[in-house]
Amino acid sequence: MAISKARRNGNSGAFPQLEKARTGIAGFDEITKGGLPKGRPTIVCGGPGCGKTMFAVEFLARGATQFGEPGVLLTFEETAGEMTKNVSSLGFDLVDLSARKKLLMDYVRIEPSEIQETGSYDLEGLFIRLQYAVDSIGAKRVVLDTLEAIFSGFSNQGLLRAEIRRLFRWLKDRGLTTVVTAERGEGMLTRHGLEEYVSDCVIFLDHRVTEQVSTRRMRVIKYRGSSHGADEYPFLIDEQGFSVLPSTSMQLNHSVSRQRISSGVQDLDAMLEGKGYYRGTSVLVSGTAGSGKSSLAAHFANQTCADGKRCLCVLFEESPDQAVRNMRSIGIDLEPHMKKGLLRVEAWRPTQSGLEMHLLRIHKLVERYRPEAVIIDPITNLMIGNTHEIHAMLMRLIDFLKTRQITAFFTALTHGGSALEQTDVGISSLIDTWLLVRDLELNGERNRGIYVLKSRGMAHSNQVREFVMTKKGIQLLPVYVGGGTVLTGSARLSQEAREKAADLGRQQETAARLKALEGKRKALEARVAALRAEFAEEEGRVAQMTEGEEQREKKEAKDMAEMISLRASRRIRPDGRA
Amino acid sequence: MRGKGKATAPVKKNIKNGKVEFLELRLYVAGQTPKSLAALANLKKICHEHLNGSYKLQVIDLVKTPQLAQGDQILAIPTLVRKLPVPIRKIIGDLSDVERVLVGLNLRETGSAK
């Protein structure tokens, strides 16, 4: 049965894979590729307070609630009441589970002072109790927490070891997926060497403090019959229980989007081919303190939410309320988005936990809210630990966001004096779009300039633009470039005023010229009119004269004709006129 | 034990302040195993020789009634539990060492037991 099911689950299909029991613990099932070995015992070991019991109880509680596998919790150190109280803070209601017959708790109390040993014995009582508990609820899972306590109760070590060996055999024979917790020992994994009996799966939990910041880590030391992640994985215990941060694949094979999303600043979009960032890429805004990085982030958040998409903001410098108030001063009201549930603002102190914990929290938030954009302001506050670690962890984060097609927007604080094009965390190579906000100090003023340092996959603007924060948000103005320096602020204004004055002068001059020309033309036209009048007069006179002449000639001709007719002589006719 | 000095009396018996103390005993066994049978036989002998009939013995077979194991926190088999007088005492094993059983039942001072 196990084989046929395993075949269905197995990724290769050709070989039967080890059947696994899912724990439901976030991240853990990914590391172990499916959970704990089904029907076999697993040892969870670690120092005091490392979370062994939490792991075990969550394994049971999730098994009972999510996978329909009731479980038996045999505790050797805490009573059922104590245990219930302890894990209720993690969101598990053991009383309810017990009432529904999904969980059975049995506290095995061992009091060495009231026990006297006489002659040979065995631990059949434990087996009977376990058997009874398993049978009464049909348990598939068993937790023994902490089995090693029996070493304190009985003096016959040889017998105990034989019985423990028998116990594991017994659990295996009944196909019970078992978690045995064990205290870490000196020079070996567990104090009493339990690992030599349980050879299927050994998980080691660690709790270490570096620079006053504690980090929990988990390692699968051994997993017989299965491949597993061998790294140390950071994990977290919070109100939702246990969660492990699996390291993401380091392969660069995430799918890319051609979709563009607006930066929230129209002028900035214009610098990025007029469309904004690519969706699912990483954007870094770096600059010195007070250069407007957070404001750019707020614009982006505002735009994302205005487009009806979810956005997650992780702030390390301001509380959510403070951020909302401050952004109102530049005309951005984030509150409606928060009320609508589109914007989620989370803020916590960067010193609160180690780097892994921060990233794990971000992971969890992303998993819970499924945002389309994540803003981290500022990412440089995550600089805890050594550079190599930070680089690796940030790469994990960026990779994680990219695989989920989430646009990541980071701000990075660069210190005055250091090269602006260099981020302290050295993540520039991981970034797709890098905006640089820089201070331009001139004429006793400090103004802001912004430019696109790089933006993969687009023909971005090469201009330095002046970055002005107004009551209506950020505006980017073209800066004045002249004399080898860029002019901003009042220098730019005065230059503009000068230009305007010059323009005005030129305009006035032209107008005057036009006026003069117009006058000239009018004078000319007047003269032309006068000449024309003179000419008309002359013409009239000439016409009059011509008419008089003609009349006179006609009269003369008439007179002549009359004369001729009077004389009646044909020879005297001087011309052809009749 | 119980504030008493080293007694020289080899057997204290279940007598306290002149009154006979009543013992309530439970023997937990799991089936008819040799160990269980030996324990029962040894216990009966001890009771007969040292308790003057002032006791009540109950034998519980956990194979038949496993639910009873939890109440007296039974892990080892066989276990003899002295329910009365308080405090509860447990003696595990086949009860072959009579001296230790008597010490365990607080019928003999620890000092003289060894």
Image (spheres, coloured by chain):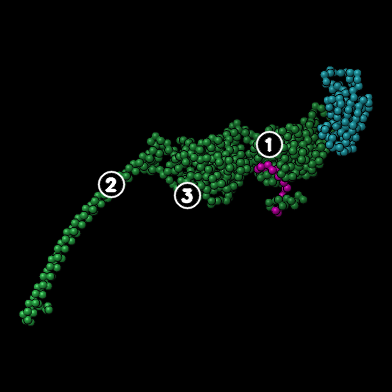
Chain colours: A green, B cyan
- Which comes sooner in the sequence, label 3 or label 2? 3
Q: Give x and y (percent) for residue A272.
A: 47, 48
Between label 1 and label 2, give the one nearer the viewer.
Answer: 2
Q: Quadrant of residue B91?
A: top right
Q: Give x and y (percent) for residue A344.
A: 58, 40
- Residue A259, placed above or below residue B2: below
Count of numbered marks? 3
Quadrant assignment for the C terminus of chain A: bottom left
Q: Return the mark for residue A509.
A: 2
Residue that label 3 marks: A274
Give the residue at x 84% y 37%. Answer: B66
Marks 3 & 1, CB-CB < 8 Å contact: no
- Which comes sooner in the sequence, label 3 or label 1? 1
The local secondary structure at tag 2 comes to: helix
Image position of A154 (left or right of B55)? left
Q: In which chain is the residue bearing label 2?
A: A
Magenta span includes A72? no
- Residue A324, placed above or below residue A524: above
The local secondary structure at tag 1 comes to: loop
Give the residue at x 24% y 49%. Answer: A516
Give the residue at x 51% y 38%. Answer: A327
Determine if marks 3 and 1 fall on one subunit: yes
What residue span does the magenta drawing correspond to? A13-28
Q: In which chain is the residue bearing label 1?
A: A
Name the kind of residue labelled 2 in the image.
Glu
Residue that label 1 marks: A90
* Closer to us: A450 or A568: A568
Name the kind of residue labelled 1 in the image.
Leu
Q: Give me the C-alpha separation between circle 3 and circle 2.
A: 40 Å
The local secondary structure at tag 3 comes to: loop
Task: Please say whether residue A191 is visible from this viewpoint.
Answer: no
Between label 3 and label 2, give the one nearer the viewer.
Answer: 2
